[in-house]
Image (tube, coloured by chain):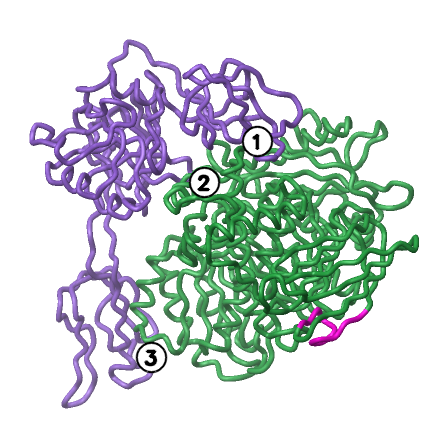
Amino acid sequence: MQAPVHHIIGLTTIVRERVLPISGNVTARIQQKVTPNDVVAETKWAREHVLLDVARLLNISPNAAERLVKCQVNDELSANTEIAKGRGMFAKSIRVPRAGRVVAVGGGQVLMEVGETKIELRAGIPGSVIQILPNKGVVIQTAGGLVQGVWGNGRIDSGILANLADAPDAVLTPNRLDVSLRGSVILAGLVKDADTLDAAAELPARGLIIASIYPSLLTKAREMRYPILVTDGFGSLPMNSAAYKLLTTNAKREVTVNAEFYDRYTGARPEVIIPLPTSSEPPSPREVAEFAPGLQVRMRRPPSMGMVGSIVSVISGLTTLPSGLRAQSAEVKLENGETVIAPLVNLEVVG
Amino acid sequence: MPSSIITSNSLLAIDVGAANTRAVLFDVIEGEYRFIASGIAPSTAEAPFKDVSEGARNAVANLQKILGKTLLDSSRNIITPTQSNGSGVDALVITLSAGPTVKTVVVGLLKDVSLDSARRLTETSYTRIMDSMSLSDQRKPDQQIDSLMRVRPELVVIAGGTDGGASRSIQKLLEPIGLASFLMPEEKRPTVLFAGNEKMEEEVKTLVGSLSTSLHFSPNIRPSLETEDIDPAERELARMIINIRKRQIKGVDLLDLWSGGHMLPTAYSTGRMVRFLSKVYGSPKGILSVDMGASATVIAAAFRNKSTLKVLPQFSLGQNLVGLLNYTTLDNILQWSSLDISSGVLLDYLHQKSLYPATIAATQEDLAISQAIAREALYLAMQTARKDFPQNITNIKSNLTPLFEPILAGGGALSDASRPGQSLLLLLDGIQPVGITTIILDQNNLLPLLGVAASQNNILPVQVLESGAFLSVGTVVSPVVSARYGTSILKAKLSYENGAEANIDLKFGSIETLPLANGETGKLTIQVSRGVDVGFGTGRGGTITVSGGALGVVFDGRGRPLNLPTDPVRRRELIKKWNWTLGGG
């Protein structure tokens, strides 16, 4: 059976596509070296529209109104510009209420885009641009450590990794967040209160990597301006040993926290990237694996949820579980020495 | 691919679900169609595969192993028709429920008339209504355009206008849609279904025709104020959803090609099968199907000439699980649990399970939580669906579940129950059936596959249904009554075919069973106490022939609507007792 793979890798080649939500201009060049904050593409986006029904405002037919409209598509108009004027001695003047761009004219109506904002797409990770996606974005390649998470608050930033996780389940409290951590990416175990998230914002921190978070804090976490990445899940789960080891051994290095939303269809996942110097291109991470003895796996459901172990054997046929359900299963030796039987669908390969 | 499969023998049916893909083989044994075997594999719509055909091939490969028969060629394509060496199949049908919910905007003239019909039509498929527009919409056209630009719907469903009626109001509603579509990049423009005034076809083409990805027309779903006819539009919408999926998910186009362009959404196919059964068996009661899957809970009900199909992604047991809390509370879910579980543990569970929808309960505590969630989701789904059941259907009380015969149940949540008794108690709690009904478990999730096969071969579904491919749990007697716990509410005598008899004195608050094996029938004579109704009328008894099943005849004396004790300790004890009575452990 094919196994999902959760990447926690010390050194690998990382290739990421960065694209605009709508089409625009790509500003990066092929082979350009980029830092996470470099703008690689940009576009403009108008959130609001104004529809001026000249025919109705002048109380004339659409055909008659069409002849009175003075503006054209793509005209940039400032507020109060006259776009049509009725006939007669006391002709009514139709003016645009806000500055904007004309996007459609027809049938005696004028449609404008207003409140245009600029969207800048940042590289997000340090590396080289290896491909330009015309009008969309770029593909960036880098080498380094990679730790995927299970939840992110949609933000992205980089900074020096500061390790406050004395243990995989150490609870982060506001009193640990002193001014020396300003501009850092903070590594911690659990967050159990909103004050801690606020305290990190006040520093300000450049990121927060935690094992688990209380579901009641998710709304607050989404509001934070710095990236928050959860490695293991919800409640009081300790950080899995593979992620804990890799992150703590890379403390004081520059890391990028891309806490993007998990999208199971595109494959986008929150992740921590630890850029590392390499003399040659390390192997790319595998995307799929077959369950087999020796594979390192993580338990996705109880018992021993979150723990890492290795497959001793894949049991043939169906196994009856303590719940009474029957499923294809594997014998897994956990890192604490305990051996458990787990259904294959509850396992994911770590690597 | 053969163009017609009416004369075919073997038929391979594939259901591509959100979590799993199943491949099922039907073949002719001794002159009749039979369910032979099924192979299962994880679905591959999601990353890293992003290609549903991979999961379909894996499921067929697993089926091959079970059958010891070759179905795939060296390029992993299905071999059709059956070859002289016995490899391959004669025909192939496919259903699909995988994929994100389709973002939809519904448009209707009047809020309580055509807009309501458009909503009902939209809810027959895997959609999420993001916005609705009608004449009573207080927003200006430019605000409606802003909303459409934010939502970026993949589908717009428009209804309104009686046939030959006024068209100006519809034009007014279509303008913002046309303008918003114009502003979107061509590849992001929505697919549009117009199911309104049929005389407006040309005007609609002019207003939005060139601005949508594709524009479809169906017969008016509201030809007059009093009449609603959704069925023809439902069919059109089903194919539109497949076409949307083709753009969203790689491999759907290939599977549709394999099926000769007959691929259907799983839910639509289930609804079609339920309608078909209603016509074939002509039961005076309704026929009900519930399917609890990872992408949606689907309720399909047919009442002779009328039917209701509800696809409810908000009550799915997959990645949307946390969203269940928009409709209920943690305490409401926990009331169904047989174990003492804290609300914090449940909340963590809902979030964690949303991350990994395909995972299963390995421990007893996990199973208790998952079953409690499934009960609440099914209960909410039934309450939602019931609002749109046709009027004038047979029921004992209008606020209770109507009378159904039979009730068919399938989907992941029921497969997750390890014993039929567990599944039955989940169904009794969630559906709360009333009167006398047969409950059938679709353990292999065949119903939608029979539905899609029915369009090609109408003998196959009937023969497979009658072949025992479904598990009859038994006959359930659920009196409508409210009384004190322990009060005698019903006495029954079951006369077996061999002349033996068994009796029961049902007390309020209890569940009892009488054995009656699968395939056997018996005469059930019921006497009820004052105020009790099992479908013969209040206080009236009667005799009826009942069929057996895995649990025989089950008497649910807990009353309707079901009110669980408020004391949590007593409640959990009772749930354990009911489970134990039904052999659910």
Looking at the magenta stretch, what is its main secondary structure? Answer: loop
CA distance for labels 3 and 1: 74 Å
From the image, state the color of chain B.
green
Of residue B193 and residue B65, the one placed in the foreground of this image is: B65
Of residue B415 and residue A85, the one placed in the foreground of this image is: B415
Query: Of the residues under marks 3 and 1, which one precedes in the sequence?
Result: 3
The spot of residue A183 in percent (x, y) is 12, 31
The spot of residue B355 in percent (x, y) is 43, 39
Give the amino acid at mark 1: Pro
CA distance for labels 1 and 2: 19 Å
Q: Which residue is mark 3?
A: A62
Question: Who's the residue at 70% across and 61% down the image?
Answer: B506
- The secondary structure type at the circle numbered 3 is helix
A339, above or below B542, in the image: above
Give the amino acid at mark 3: Pro
Q: Is residue B265 something that shows in the picture?
A: no
Magenta residues, as a range? B532-542
Task: Choose top left, top right, bottom left or bottom right for residue A170.
Answer: top left
Label 1 chain ID:
A
From the image, state the color of chain A.
purple
- Queried whether the magenta region covers residue B242, the answer comes back as no
Q: Which residue is mark 1?
A: A322
As drawn, is A14 to the left or to the right of B156?
Answer: left
Badge 2 and badge 3 both on one subunit: no
Badge 3 and badge 1 both on one subunit: yes
Q: Which mark is residue A138?
A: none
CA distance for labels 2 and 3: 56 Å
Q: Which residue is mark 2?
A: B353
As drawn, is A88 to the left or to the right of A273?
Answer: left
Question: Who's the residue at 50% across and 30% down the image?
Answer: A346
Give the amino acid at mark 2: Lys
